Image: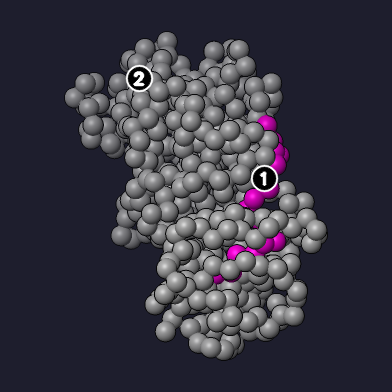
Amino acid sequence: MHFATLLVSAGLVHLSIAGYTLEDDYSAANFFSMFNFQTVSTRTYSVKKNPANWIQESDPTGGYVNYLDQPTAQSDGLINTNNGLVYIGVDNTNVASGRGRNSVRLESKKTYTHALIVLDLAHMPAGCGTWPAFWTFGPSWPNLGEIDVIEGVNDQTTNSMTLHTSDGCSANSPAGAFTGQQNTYNCYVGATNQSANEGCGFSATADNSYGAGFNSNGGGVYAMEWTSDYIQIFFWPGGSAPSDALGDTPNPSSWGRPAALFQGNCDIDQHFSDHQITFDMTFCGSWAGDAWGDGNCAAQHGNSCNAFVQNTPSAFKETYWSVNSLRVYQNSPSSNTAPSAASKPQPAAIPAAVPEASSVSSAASAPQSTSTTSTTSSTLVASSSTHSVVTVTAAPVIITIAAPSTTLAPKTSSVYSSQAAPTLDVLPANAEVLQSDEFGAGSPGIPDPWRRRNRRHLAQHIRSAHAHL
């Protein structure tokens, strides 16, 4: 019989990436100095971002927009930091001409690979003809990926959260692990069974997550956590974010389910790297223009998105970002050090959800790791007809996944080792392993922190085991 065994170590912290510390504070005092103002593009894009059809465009969305440099944007009143808030807007007083309505596109000067990015907004752009986004992207698009944290068009009421990648990445997150609605699964921009550049995406379910509903509710907070094993996006309406989410040491493992969780058949470190944080506000183009007739905008403002944007400047008084704070955190290396035996916490209590005794075995029934490392652990054991053996021990953390048999055999079992040893109360659904070894039975050997395939594989087993506890 197949079964799952999960031993929760007394010497562990939460297995997901924990110990975040502040790396960059995009405060009002230095906000605009930390961004480049992207104007007429010197890069090659496609209007539909279709890799088979690259053409030169001043805006990658094909929008009716004219991005300004910093001096012009400032003198025209499109940016300011009055009253400690960051304002990023568009021209709402003049009839547009040329390339389109004057706007701003910001791309961070610094790039990031893995991060926790927390954005506290008082207001986001809204209204017919608009296409705002807060997102990150890497060089050589789409080879190093794009993460859309906030995006929508026209009179859309719920936020869209999407990944765009090169071929070979899909997100098949476990049901119940997120609060949003997953709409598409293949992250590849050229996927044949999806629209061009549709990516893998989620929709938020709350009407206060985007646009006018977001603004009338007093804004809100978005957080995006990007690790080697998953990318997840959280949303809290105004005033409801966890206190640590806006502090100096946030802990995503305590935040509950995200709105969107991207994990599955995707080597994240291969598809996502060196991202710039981006704010932009474009108009019409390949999404807002194409979707112009889908809602109420065409009925209210005529058949042409471009004509409306060009000739109705007063309609864009609500087209602005108002940023309370933007902070970027990185996992603290010091949090990945094993504590001394004297500092180890007491074993975690077994949660009330553990099955009845008839389906629970003792730790002695689990296969043993070949490692001779001395360990301290508490035990949660649950039977399952579908899962392999999962064993977690401590100091250093040794996590063994075995095929459903009484012995460990090469290529059917794996030993994972981690020198990271934080503490843990109850293993959450998004548990992760920080380091891992190569596939194969035997001693864990020297931990390799970047064996991404094994870590992702292990995380899936741990999540599966947790679901059956």
State how far apart marks 1 and 2 are (Cα).
45 Å
Q: Amino acid at mark 2?
A: Gln
Q: Residues within 10 Å of mark 2 (few under 14, many from 20)?
A: many
Q: How is the image coloured?
A: one colour
Q: Which residue is mark 1?
A: 20
Q: Position of residue 87 (x, y in %)?
A: 54, 19
**Residue 459 in sight:** yes
Q: Give residue 296's quadrant in the image.
A: top left
Which region shows up in magenta? 6-25
Residue 108, image x and y in percent?
A: 62, 36
- Label 2 sits on a secondary structure element that is helix
* Residue 347 drawn at (x, y percent): 65, 60
In the image, residue 64 lies at what x, y percent?
A: 39, 28
**On screen, 44 above or below 413?**
above
Q: Nearer the viewer, mark 1 or mark 2?
A: 1
The residue that label 2 is drawn on is: 310
Q: Quadrant of the N terminus?
A: bottom left
Say which of 448 and 358 sits in front: 358
Toward the viewer: 251 or 352? 352
Residue at left offset 46%, top offset 16%: 91
Q: Is residue 405 above or below residue 333?
A: below
Residue in the image at 32% along x and 25% along y: 128
Displayed quadrant of residue 359: bottom left
In this rendering, would 154 be left or right of 111? left
Disc 1 packing (10 Å; few <14; some 14–19; many ≥20): many
Q: Find out whether residue 226 is within the magenta segment.
A: no
